[in-house]
Image (cartoon, rainbow, N blue to C red):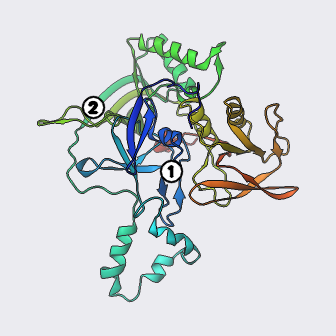
Amino acid sequence: MRIAGKGLHTGGKTVNFSFNGRHLMGLEGDTLASALLANDIHLVGRSFKYHRPRGILTAGSEEPNALVTLGHGAGQDPNIRATTQELYEGLEARSQNCWPSVEHDLLAVNNLAAPFFGAGFYYKTFMWPTAFWEKLYEPLIRRAAGLGALSGEADTDCYEKAYAFCELLVVGSGPAGLMAALTAGRAGVDVLLLEEDSHLGGRLLVEHEEIDGKPARVWLQDSLAELRAMANVRLMARTAVTGAYDQGTYGALERVGHHEMRQHSLKGCHRPRECFWRIAAKHCVLAAGAIERPVAFRNNDRPGVMMASAVRAYLNRWGVAPGERVTLFANNDDAHRTARDLVRAGVHLAAVIDSRHDAPESDLYPVMKGAQICNTSGGKRLESVTVRSVRGEEKIQTDCLAMSGGWNPSVHLTCHLNARP
């Protein structure tokens, strides 16, 4: 599913990894999610309660579905988001919350009994007979609860803690964060810029934009070169701010060794796996961007249903098409960027559906205005969508649905100290 000439890592060296015991190949710079999509793998897990098939939904840390377990034994690490896990040589990943396999999960029978599992089902059912609770009900419930599991062995990895002080903390390295850092850095302010991704740039890595009369990626490279040349500016990738506390104190977690094979010596590990930072800052600029909203309709959780911005990200950053026949469903202009980029990359658009009656026209593709998707069909992979319009209902064959309900700003950190958005 690679698109020739697309992506930031075109021509990169191949990386060997495995998923559910199957040997696969990706490219240097891939995430586990982009490598799986490049190998046309969409089914990656099962839902918590009904064990419905789950696929990759997003391309970032907001991913709710693609949670996997890495490694085994003492190094087993559950509930890792495939969308943020960088690919490295020898990576071993597997699906979780399924048995005996993600393709054939016996507990998927729960989905057939869903009408009987209403609110309060557990409280009404497991009360009698009383003697069954300790020997039958509780062991079964505990076994079914949770998603991934720890191995139970002692963790052999090393972890570190550190402190940092700055005049200005910038959270996020998109265009807003970079401009804040540039402006402060040029004024001689002591700046610390943190980015949870492995690369700085935010959405500039996946969009075809123009800033100051030059392509956004060129502007990004120039800006980063200027920032790195400033002695009063520090840039940290793979570092997520986890909390805002009193008196300008912030917590941040740096993923030091998650992107490489773990190495241990007789005296212990060579480098820490993670480092927790306590940061004291006089001022903070929150430039964490925004998260795209999904759209609610029946069976919108099938593998192959993705966010429109994620489809665009996999195409432009990793050179991967998440489907051969892609359908777009949106209610905003921004999502049409995905349709344009797909057409220009040679990916077939099955349909572009916009719920607005005054949606803009396009010279590249026809737009179904005032229509909406009301259902999807397929088993372990999306096969078709049902579209409802003034003409009635019709089915469209598709293996990937890019949906967008607009954007919500990521203002979570402002809420930690009771601030109102």
Residue at the spot 81% in from the left edge and 33% down from the top edge: 362
Task: Find numbered disc 1 in the image and state the secondary structure of the residue it sits on.
Answer: loop
Residue furthest to the left in view is 266
Q: Which mark is residue 192?
A: none
Residue furthest to the bottom in view is 129
Q: Callout 2: 10 Å neighbours few (<14), some, many (20+)? A: few
Q: Nearer the viewer, residue 14 or 110?
A: 14
Residue 281 as seen in the image, left or right of residue 301:
left
**Contact? badges 1 and 2 (CB < 8 Å):** no
In the picture of the structure, the residue carrying the numbered disc 2 is 162
Task: Find numbered disc 2 in the image and state the secondary structure of the residue it sits on.
Answer: strand
Residue 72 as seen in the image, left or right of residue 206:
left
Residue furthest to the right in view is 391
Asked if residue 152 can be seen in this view, the reply is yes
Q: Callout 1: 10 Å neighbours few (<14), some, many (20+)? A: some
Q: Nearer the viewer, residue 210 or 177?
A: 210
For the image, the number of numbered tags is: 2
Q: Nearer the viewer, residue 22 or 161?
A: 22
Note whether 30 is above or below 70 in the view shown: above
Where residue 262 appears, as percent x and y from the top left, is 26, 37
Residue at the spot 24% in from the left edge and 51% down from the top edge: 73
Residue at the spot 85% in from the left edge and 45% down from the top edge: 357
Q: Amino acid at mark 1?
A: Pro
Q: Amino acid at mark 2?
A: Ala
Asked if residue 187 can be seen in this view, the reply is no
Where residue 271 appears, as percent x and y from the top left, is 23, 32
In the picture of the structure, the residue carrying the numbered disc 1 is 64
Q: Quadrant of residue 236?
A: top left
